[in-house]
Image (tube, grey):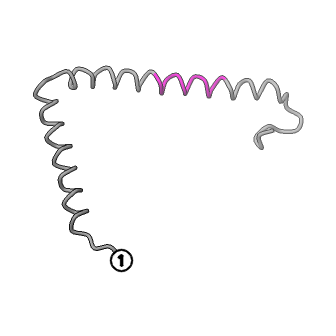
Amino acid sequence: MPQFIAPGDPALLKSLWLAGVHFIIANIWQISVVMMVGSAGKWLANARFAQVLNAATGSVLVVFGIRLALTQRPV
């Protein structure tokens, strides 16, 4: 049992209360994520944003490739 449930308190009632609070917080979090992803979908559908994103990720991959080519392996 959780430490904050006193020995004389009804454990089932407090456990259900804790589960209910956890359920509400989880739903608020998931609804927030869905709303953020929904608004990000509008950006991702934009052709200009897709070009910028492709250029940025391509640049990062080129930089990683150059860094990998210039690193010396231990013998």
The C terminus appears in which quarter of the rendering?
Answer: bottom left
Q: Which residues are magenta?
A: 20-30
Of the pair 71 and 57, the residue shown nearer to us = 71
**Residue 22 % position (x, y):** 62, 28
Which residue shows up at 21% across the image and 43% down it?
57
- Secondary structure of the residue carrying numbered label 1: loop
Residue depicted at x 34% and y 25%: 36
Which residue lies under the disc numbered 1?
A: 74
* Dominant secondary structure (helix, strand or loop) of the stretch shown in magenta: helix
Q: Is residue 42 magenta?
A: no
| Horizontal side of residue 62 vs 22, given as left or right | left
Q: Residue 25: which quarter of the image?
A: top right
Q: Please name the residue shown 17% across and 43% down the image.
A: 56
Quadrant hosting residue 33: top left
Residue 46 versus residue 29: which sits nearer the camera? 46
Q: Decide which of 33, 5 is in the foreground and name it.
A: 33
Q: What residue is drawn where x is 27% and y is 25%?
A: 40
